[in-house]
Image: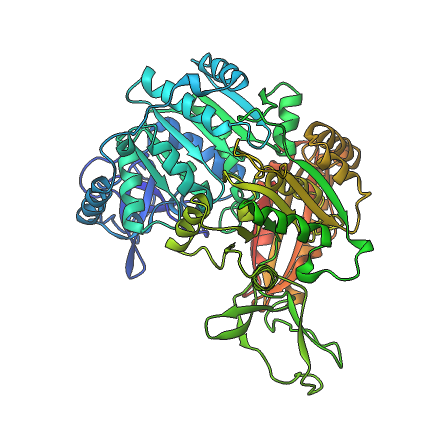
Amino acid sequence: MRSLIQVALDVPIAAHFDYFAGEGTLKPGDWVWVPWGKGQRLGLVLAVDTSPQWDLDRIREILAPAKALEPIDKASLSFWQQVADYYHCGLGELLLASLPKLLRTSQSPQAALGKAWQRWMASRPAQAMAPWHRSQLHSQQAEALDKLSALTQGFAPVLLHGITGSGKTAVYLSYISLLIERDASAQVLLLVPEIGLTPQLAKTLESTLPPKSIAILHSGLADNLRAAVWSAASRGELRLIVGTRSAIFVPMPHLAAIIVDEEHDASYKQWESVRYQARDLAVWRAQQRQIPVILGSATPSMESWHAAERGRYRRLSLSERANLLPPPEIELVDMRKIRQAAAGLAPRSRELIASLLQEKAQVLLFLNRRGFAPLLQCSACAWLSPCLACSAYQVLHRQASGFQLICHHCGLRAKVPKFCPQCGNSDLSPQGRGTQKLEEELQAIFPQARIARLDRDSSQGKRLAQTLAAIHEGAIDLVVGTQMLAKGHDWARLQAVVVLEADNGLFAADYRATERLFANLMQVAGRAGRSHQAFVQAPRVLIQTAHPEHPLFADVRSHDFHAHAAKLLDERKTLGLPPFRHHVVIRAQAKQADAVFEFLEAAKQWFEQWLLAQGSSALPLLRCYDPVPMNLARIDHWHRAQLLLEAGDRPLLHRCLSDFKADPYRQQRRVASLHWYFDVDPQDI
């Protein structure tokens, strides 16, 4: 009798699907091509049944084994299944979505893989230019390296807390070099939060480690190259993978350590499909492999900081800059006293910029808002430029062909109207300021200055690398940009930072807003004064604010992360917020708002009945709140709302979620065009 196999697919309707195995021997962890409708899909074998007991007439046979992909070993398969169970998704949804498209769609990718790999190898330098020496580390870095090098066996989670400019990257480099010296086959995974951080980091790594053993992995690469890198890593041919969050899924048979740089960054959270947190997956994967994991940050997440406070993570500190210079002085500029602010800059800020331009120093202007202006307004009736598909405004952008209104949420574009659509008035004016407008205004105030803008609009393709290279070479005087500028960059001539509109986030509804604002301010402040290059003006950071008395700014001025973290943790403990309690959000969307709330109200009733059935001891451990609209209640014509579950007992919470997904009564309440999902450990509520 033919064997029956259970196959996981990237399809959310079931955890697995049954197929005949066909000829040959298959085992759990093998990849196979299976028929799906009129096409085919890549699948992962979960189980093999050699003596099925039911009617097999309608079961189809697999097409072929997927020989281009290395099988997943039994231990790794079990681990990834546990991760899928935690996020309440299918294993196929979790793993298959992370694969490069070529590996997911082609039965015979070998030729394309080979060509991509040969081109990539031919582009690499023959060898590293200058090996990294431990003597290049200052005392604190060397001490941290000694403690890391002592982690020779077993799972060892380490929080490397180093102020901006303290040289965490040098510690990573030294540690990676040490691991490869000890074992020539060792592999290391280095996660970074954004593509923008990889060019500079890649150059540093390639100048100190064998370039042909290092590969970058992110969504900006050509898919053929991504697939070739993925395949080479899974065969153990690469020593170091530097990648963004999806790189956590890359198979690495000789994985010796995982490093998560800027571990606090929100970019490690996946916002689509399976909403995993790559930082957490890194810790869990290191635990499963019994290897060290290093979480590095100047402003650690409260979850990681709390784990270190409790002794679950070992904390190593770098409290001084690698250049042994003091951090820049931070000055608050009270905008309440200023009537005229050309380009949104206080006179103090303009004076500082002018004096530094005379010294041929660089200044960074941080404005976390892209586009030309946040909206367009009518002077007669106060009409604002709405997005017709979202509960948001369209942002005014300056394009090569002229101005255009663009929604940052659904991408809807519209021409700038000549007359107000509401009253017919012709006086329509931009309100507020984005990075495009700031760049234009700065050019008018400082006509001799060479200005570069770095945001999502100006950093597509090769332009990002070209802009970063120009800044490094000193061909740029003023750098304007969003939070892309706030981390990971090391520019020798950058002597000052000016932060505009720093109050955004002070009074937001999201309880994580102040944590993110503090991190952004500390990170961007750390870009100033990172070299010994002599300037008359001392390194300085100006933060323009209308709330200089706010306690957050006191902690920023004193560079005191410890004090700020203590306040946040005390506040969250009092309010019952993570990391002291656990959150899951059920989010739903539909074309009709009523359908969303009907579903969530029914879900709330289900949870309350389930909790009552568990007995009185469970009542204090789980709470279900009322459904509410999401912060953006409508995107691309979809109405959105959410239901928050809060628990003091994580196993009880996950048992409840599993029962909810499996309940047959809930399955019968499906509404056409309604979609819902769990967001476990949400980053925004």
Question: Quadrant location of residue 135?
Answer: top left
Q: Is residue 546 above or below residue 649?
A: below
- Is residue 33 among what the camera can see? yes
**Colour mode of the rendering:** rainbow
Q: Is residue 233 left or right of residue 303?
A: left
In x, y percent, where is residue 529?
57, 36
- Is residue 90 among what the camera can see? no
Residue at the image point whose x is 42% and y is 40% from the top? 200
Camera-side residue: 523 or 621?
A: 523
Q: How many marks?
A: 0
In x, y percent, where is residue 632?
65, 60
In x, y percent, where is residue 26?
25, 36
Q: Is residue 443 above or below residue 88?
A: below
In x, y percent, where is residue 79?
44, 30
Residue at the image point whose x is 41% and y is 22% from the top? 174
Q: Is residue 610 above or below residue 272?
A: above
Residue at the image point whose x is 33% and y is 47% from the top? 100
**Residue furthest bottom in the image:** 424
Camera-side residue: 679 or 334?
A: 334
Camera-side residue: 680 or 615?
A: 680
Q: Quadrant of the N terminus?
A: top left
